[in-house]
Amino acid sequence: MNPFIAYFIGVLFAVPAAVIVWLVSVFAFGQSFLSSGAFSLVGGILLFFLVPSYLKYRMLKKHGLTRKEYHYISQNLREAKLKISRLNKALFSVRQIASLKQNIELMRVIRKIHSLTKKEPKRFYKAERFYFSHLDSVVELTEKYVFLSSQPKKSPELEQSLKETRRMIEEMNRSIEQDLYHVLSDDIDDLHYEIDVAKHSINTIIDSPFQEESRSLR
């Protein structure tokens, strides 16, 4: 959960609770304004910290992660976001119209992997090859390609290097597409299972005695 949202929710709970504690202390228990203010402040502070902690606990339990795992994944996702921004800037510095569609598709796949992992952190373990290898490679290759292609004079050796780099970037595109399929592999398996169950249900209905009787009456 976004820390800002968690603490904003904490404030939403803490402020009304502090007011209620103050009112109850003054009017129900006859405490002084100063004492009631102290009670309300303590109650508000407790809720301010307890509510975000509880929400984080629920989120970790939902995704089956420990605090250490979640911190590790969150840190890698933040680093990946910076790399994705670098890649986006580099890709759209390329002036070749022929590369535009390929670049847009590459960014779409990369952002999809990142958003899926951010929404369901446990998917990170299926995307480790992407985060620790393929993303770094495609960022470095693209930035070097942009730098070299921007040079005013290109020797035959430089042209050959640019051609080879383009080929490698295309291969990385295919590898990253495979990374997305791997991240979605469990969902694909679940879909195939549901399809098999549905087919079995349909076949059971077709082969049922009621259906046989209906066909014989016709």
Image: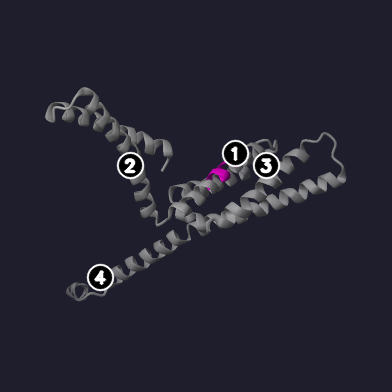
- Indicate the amino acid at tag 1: Ser
Q: Is residue 31 magenta?
A: no
| Disc nearer the start of the sequence (4/3) | 3
Pick whichever of labels 2 and 1 is earlier in the sequence: 2
Residue assigned mark 2: 50
Task: Say what amino acid the circle numbered 4 marks.
Answer: Ile
Tag 3: amino acid = Ala
Tag nearer the camera, 2 or 1? 2
- Of the image marks 1 and 4, the number of the one nearer the N terminus: 1
134 over 193 or under it: above or below: above
Q: Residue 207 in the image: x percent, y percent?
A: 26, 75
Q: Which residue is label 3 attached to?
A: 98
**Of the pair 216 and 78, the residue shown nearer to us:** 78
Q: Which mark is residue 205?
A: 4
Instruction: Provide the secondary structure element on which disc 3 rests.
Output: helix
Q: Position of residue 173 (x, y in %)?
A: 63, 51
The residue tagged 1 is 85
**Which is more N-terminal, label 2 or label 4?**
2
Q: Nearer the viewer, mark 4 or mark 2?
A: 2
Secondary structure category for the residue under label 2: helix
Please name the amino acid that badge 2 sits on. Answer: Leu
Q: Secondary structure at mark 4?
A: helix
Residue at the image point whose x is 48% and y is 50% from the top: 117
Q: Are marks 4 and 3 in contact (CB under 8 Å)?
A: no
Question: Badge 1, how many Cα within 10 Å: few under 14, some, many 20+?
Answer: few
Q: Position of residue 214 (x, y in %)?
A: 19, 72
- Magenta span: predominant SS is helix
The magenta region covers 77-82
